[in-house]
Image: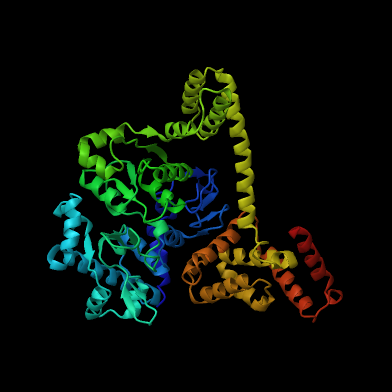
């Protein structure tokens, strides 16, 4: 059931796009609105523009765009109706009745019900059943308190192929639903089996308190040490963090990034609410940007082995790209945070956090690895690596401090090292500018996605102009529709937008083009806002719109062979030629 236009209008009025987006990114005021670093791709120069007057955003770097509903769909990984609910709750609005009558939303709600029921089953097995004794012994050995087990909803999956699935069927869930929720797999004989068997269970909970997935650690026997839910309609492991539902409520503006579930839980039990971990994968750009919403600083607390140090290096780079200050813990006497807290206590661990070295010192120390510092060749190699590290420091003051230190340590003139670093910075800046310009051309140029832009440039430009004209002049829809038939369009997407826009404008006086997000995907809305953004500086009046209509009509007649150019009127031909010249 479509949502009433007046409800959507009120929803947007109560959730100004700049207010909503400011909760996710830092906005900089500009004459026509705001600019910011795009939250959906990594960049160093702001290419995301917010038009507050018309209520939309558009990134010229990656092409994403839309209104405040589209933004929430992208930022929170929600479907349209869920994004509307999110904004309604944010502004204290009641949803219209039957608004959730959506197949995909019902499917997601059903999976969340399944996960909630399964989490309760695993927890009851652990805490109340004799079958959970093995899990209880494991958590006891890891020194987890009953309070922590309750807080995280920990559980145990019995050692059986159908224990969970048999129980879930008694609760009214079908085999197909259990497979879709990734709690069960399909065997060679076509039957289903439980994915989690003889494992302690860690429910993964989103920011709204929903159980969206599970992690399971094997206690003994064969199989992978950790088994994690695959992606489902309610879960994308690259976009979520374990325990962020607790960490987001911390008073501290820093996050601790640990390596696994048990590290997080041990650190949290030690009195540190602000700790998170990835979900069986290395840190992703999406997770780094997610962390930047809740912290100005991240302390990386990975294992001290080779794999942990390599993961630390990657995390430093991703967090830096997300604009987050990064520090690294250096642990001695323990291989991981869990062991450290058990051996030395929470007070020592807090001192470790407070005295953690910056990412720069971590990278400088790594620059020494494998180098003979006593040889001239080794010193040169070390200084080259140091120069690459120091060139990453954004603050000139901070960079100057490190330059002075390294120059003094290595007994070389400070100016020589400084010039080397500034040369690297200049080259990187030039390269970054070229890359971002190329990205903007790649994402914002229709030529990559629409061959019609090359084959029929005048028609393509006219189609964009007509859509922009109707967006700003909805009262002209009747006249335009009488003269411009949908079949005149050369681009299929433009034709769809035109048809749906006319249909909506006929049925609602308050409708605007950005409300089409209920009928187009978030990516498609980005294409629509691209059209609006590119035509924002062009004054499209009734006369220009008429030229566009004639261009499209004449182009159609020529393509279908019903009106050669020689049979055009002089005025039509002149307009057609003029449009072709202007499009080049």
Q: Is residue 99 visible?
A: no
In which quadrant will I find the N terminus? bottom left
For the point 39% across and 79% down, the residue is 188
Q: Position of residue 459 (x, y in %)?
A: 71, 68
In which quadrant will I find the C terminus? bottom right
For the point 43% across and 48% down, the residue is 25
> Which residue occupies the foreground of this view, 374 or 509?
374
> Relative to 545, is 173 on the left or the right?
left
Q: How many marks?
A: 0
> Which residue occupies the foreground of this view, 321 or 27?
321
Q: Is residue 472 above or below residue 36?
A: below
Q: Position of residue 279 (x, y in %)?
A: 36, 56
Q: Is residue 182 visible?
A: yes
Which of the 4 image quarters holds residue 384?
A: top right
Q: What is the basis of the colouring in this image?
A: rainbow
Give the residue at the far front of this rendering.
221
> Relative to 341, is 238 on the left or the right?
right
> Which residue occupies the foreground of this view, 439 or 212?
212
Q: Position of residue 507 (x, y in %)?
A: 49, 77
For the point 51% across and 74% down, the residue is 504
> Which residue occupies the foreground of this view, 329 or 76?
329
Q: Is residue 222 above or below residue 380?
A: below
Q: Is residue 205 above or below residue 263?
A: below
Q: Position of residue 425 (x, y in %)?
A: 58, 33
């Amino acid at each position: 059931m479509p949502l009433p236009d007046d409800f959507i209008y009120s929803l947007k009025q109560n959730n100004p796009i700049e207010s909503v987006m400011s909760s996710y990114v830092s906005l900089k005021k500009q004459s026509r609105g705001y600019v910011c670093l795009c939250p959906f791709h990594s960049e160093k120069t702001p290419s995301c523009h917010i038009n507050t007057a018309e209520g939309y955003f558009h990134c010229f770097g990656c092409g994403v765009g839309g209104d405040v509903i589209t933004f929430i769909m992208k930022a929170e990984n929600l479907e349209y109706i869920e994004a509307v609910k999110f904004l309604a709750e944010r502004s204290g609005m009641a949803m219209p009745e039957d608004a959730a009558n959506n197949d995909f939303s019902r499917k997601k709600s059903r999976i969340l019900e399944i996960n909630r029921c399964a989490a309760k089953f695993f927890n009851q097995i652990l805490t109340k059943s004799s079958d959970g004794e093995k899990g209880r012994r494991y958590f006891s050995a890891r020194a987890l308190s009953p309070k922590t087990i309750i807080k995280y909803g920990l559980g145990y999956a019995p050692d059986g192929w159908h224990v969970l699935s048999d129980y879930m069927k008694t609760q009214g869930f079908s085999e197909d639903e259990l497979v879709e929720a990734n709690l069960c797999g399909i065997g060679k004989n076509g039957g289903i089996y439980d994915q989690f068997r003889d494992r302690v269970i860690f429910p993964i909970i989103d920011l709204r308190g929903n159980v969206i997935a599970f992690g399971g650690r094997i206690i003994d026997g064969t199989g992978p040490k950790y088994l994690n839910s695959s992606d489902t309609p309610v879960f994308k492991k690259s976009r979520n963090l374990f325990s962020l539902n607790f960490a987001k409520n911390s008073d501290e503006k820093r996050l601790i990034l640990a390596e696994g579930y048990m590290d997080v839980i041990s650190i949290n039990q030690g009195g540190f609410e602000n700790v998170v971990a990835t979900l069986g994968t290395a840190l992703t750009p999406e997770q780094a940007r997610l962390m930047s919403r809740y912290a100005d600083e991240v302390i990386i607390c990975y294992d001290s082995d080779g794999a942990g140090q390599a993961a630390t290096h990657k995390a430093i780079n991703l967090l830096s790209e997300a604009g987050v200050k990064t520090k690294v813990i250096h642990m001695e006497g323990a291989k991981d945070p869990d062991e450290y807290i058990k051996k030395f206590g929470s007070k020592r661990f807090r001192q470790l956090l407070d005295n953690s070295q910056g990412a720069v010192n971590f990278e400088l120390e790594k620059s020494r690895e494998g180098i003979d510092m006593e040889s001239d060749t080794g010193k040169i190699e070390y200084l080259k690596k140091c120069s690459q590290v120091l060139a990453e420091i954004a603050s000139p003051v901070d960079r100057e401090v490190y330059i002075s230190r390294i120059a003094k340590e290595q007994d070389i003139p400070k100016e020589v090292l400084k010039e080397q670093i500034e040369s690297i910075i200049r080259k990187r800046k030039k390269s970054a500018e070229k890359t971002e310009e190329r990205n903007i051309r790649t994402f914002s140029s229709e030529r990559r996605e629409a061959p019609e832009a090359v084959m029929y440039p005048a028609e393509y430009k006219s189609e964009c102009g007509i859509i922009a004209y109707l967006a700003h002049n909805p009262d002209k829809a009747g006249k335009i529709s009488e003269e411009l038939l949908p079949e005149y369009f050369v681009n299929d997407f433009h034709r769809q937008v035109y048809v749906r826009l006319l249909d909506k404008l006929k049925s609602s006086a308050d409708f605007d083009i950005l409300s089409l997000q209920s009928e187009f995907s978030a990516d498609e809305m980005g294409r629509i806002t691209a059209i609006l953004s590119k035509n924002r500086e062009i004054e499209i009046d009734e006369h220009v719109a008429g030229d566009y209509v004639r261009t499209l009509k004449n182009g159609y007649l020529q393509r279908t062979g019903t009106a050669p150019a020689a049979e055009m009127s002089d005025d039509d031909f002149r307009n057609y030629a003029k449009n072709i010249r202007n499009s080049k």
